[in-house]
Image (cartoon, helix red, strand yellow):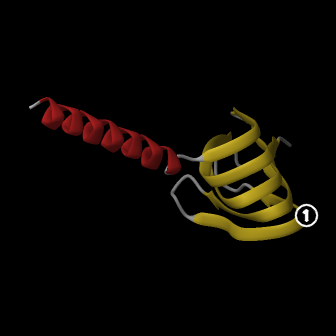
Amino acid sequence: MKRTVLLFTAFALLLAAGITVFAGCSREDFTGSRVKNPDAYLLDIERMQGTDSHTLSLQAGDTLRVELQVEEGALSLDILSPDGVSIYSGNSKGASDFTVNITESGAYTIAVEAQRAKGMLHFRAERP
């Protein structure tokens, strides 16, 4: 009887440890600095694996300045208008700076996906 209880307890502990390990593997992995505010989304990435997003409040006539530098791995991003339509979609290796002209006021969503990435992504709203 004691042996059965001992075996059952050992099995339960192993199962709990396995669930904990596998649950930890599915989380986003991010090391670095992440700043999110209404006018900016700044990622300085030491290591990122997974996805992240942020919503910026932009006005018609604003310009969204994008600075991106990928030192390792890969980064892809989408910028979605208030109605959910992609106004920019791309991936990058190396460095790139560009602007997106905002024609409609509202909440713009920036979605980032990283695969073993190291680098920098900065999005800043510039008002006229």
* Position in image of residue 9 (x %, y %): 24, 33
* Extreme residue toward the left, this view: 1
Q: Residues within 10 Å of mark 1 (few under 14, many from 20)?
A: few
Q: Amino acid at mark 1?
A: Ala
Q: Quadrant of residue 57?
A: top right
On the question of residue 95 being in view, the answer is yes
The residue to which callout 1 is attached is: 95
Q: How many marks?
A: 1
Q: Quadrant of the N terminus?
A: top left
Q: Is residue 52 above or below residue 38?
A: below
Q: Is residue 83 above or below residue 28?
A: below
Taking the spot 60% from the left edge, 56% from the top edge, the residue there is: 81
Q: Left or right: 70 with respect to 116?
A: right
On the question of residue 108 being in view, the answer is no
User: Foreground: 17 or 40?
Assistant: 17
* Position in image of residue 17 (x %, y %): 40, 40
SS category of the residue bearing label 1? strand
Q: Quadrant of the C terminus?
A: top right
Taking the spot 39% from the left edge, 46% from the top edge, the residue there is: 18
